[in-house]
């Protein structure tokens, strides 16, 4: 059984200070999940390298575009763009239909609906704030829904990138 506190004599890592039970056998982080099934589903949601992201990256790369993946265009702003074109100062965000409230495909959660409605509202407000902060710093923001055709989106990105040179 792994000890819950490091025995090296050094100060615990940042992660262990924040979640002292991480890494212990049988221990887990505190969660907001309403059931074990919901918790498992939430844990399986990826923060990057999703299927729509990979398809968009393949399409952009096929057009000869080169970009950085999952970086903060502005280091002082804690927002990570999916694709970043540093020379063109273009940040591309691929927004999920559920998480960002797509007017075409967003579905209302059946369980804990109030929580999820508030979550989507906060995400949309943060998206608007991100757009504003990036614009103030001289960056252009291009937002894409996950359901959009990656080839068409890549062509629009290419126009934006090449038009800025």
Image: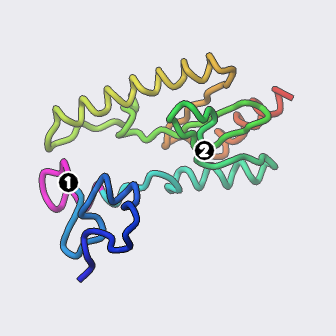
Quadrant location of residue 133?
top right
Q: Nearer the viewer, mark 1 or mark 2?
A: 1
Q: How is the image coloured?
A: rainbow
> Which of 86 and 1 lies nearest the eye of the viewer?
1
Residue 99, percent from left and from top: 36, 39
Residue 123: which numbered mark, if any? Answer: none
Specify the quadrant that holds the N terminus: bottom left
Residue at the location (57% across, 39% down)?
81
- Which quadrant of the structure image shows residue 85? top right
Q: Which residue is mark 1?
A: 30
In the rendered view, tell whether residue 117 sits above or below residue 48.
Answer: above
> SS for tag 1?
loop
User: How far across and how far down the image is residue 84, in percent?
Assistant: 67, 40
Given residues 161 and 21, the one toward you in this image is 21
The percent position of residue 154, horizontal first and vertical second, equals 69, 42
| Residue 93 falls left or right of residue 23 | right
Q: Could you tell me how far apart the alpha carbons at marks 1 and 2 are, in whole angstroms?
A: 27 Å
Residue pictured at 71% horizontal, 48% vertical: 60
The residue drawn where x is 18% and y is 61% is 37
User: 90 or 11: which is nearer to us?
Assistant: 11
Residue projecting furthest to the bottom: 1
Q: Which residue is mark 2?
A: 71
Residue at 37% x, 57% y: name it: 15
N-term-proximal mark, 1 vs 2 = 1
Regarding mark 2 in the picture, which secondary structure is present there?
strand
Q: Nearer the viewer, residue 79 or 112?
A: 79
Decide if residue 158 is on the left or right side of residue 23.
right
The region drawn magenta spans 30-42
- Above-or-below relation of 162 to 37: above
Q: Quadrant of the C terminus?
A: top right
Q: Is residue 33 magenta?
A: yes
CA neighbours of label 1 inside 10 A, class few (<14), some (14 to 19), many (20+)? few
């Amino acid at each position: 059984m792994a000890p819950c506190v490091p025995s090296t004599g050094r100060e615990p890592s940042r992660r262990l200070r924040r979640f002292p039970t991480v890494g212990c056998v049988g221990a887990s982080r505190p969660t907001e999940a309403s059931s074990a099934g919901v918790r498992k589903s939430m844990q399986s949601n990826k923060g990057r390298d999703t299927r729509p992201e990979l398809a968009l990256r393949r399409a952009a790369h096929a057009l000869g575009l080169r970009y950085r993946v999952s970086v903060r265009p502005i280091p002082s702003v804690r927002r990570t763009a999916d694709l970043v074109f540093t020379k063109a100062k273009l940040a591309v965000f691929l927004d999920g239909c559920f998480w960002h409230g797509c007017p075409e495909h967003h579905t209302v959660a059946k369980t804990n609906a109030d929580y999820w409605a508030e979550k989507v509202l906060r995400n949309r407000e943060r998206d608007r704030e991100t757009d504003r902060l990036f614009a103030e710093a001289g960056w252009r923001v291009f937002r894409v829904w996950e359901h959009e055709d990656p080839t068409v989106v890549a062509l629009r990105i290419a126009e934006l990138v090449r038009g800025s040179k």
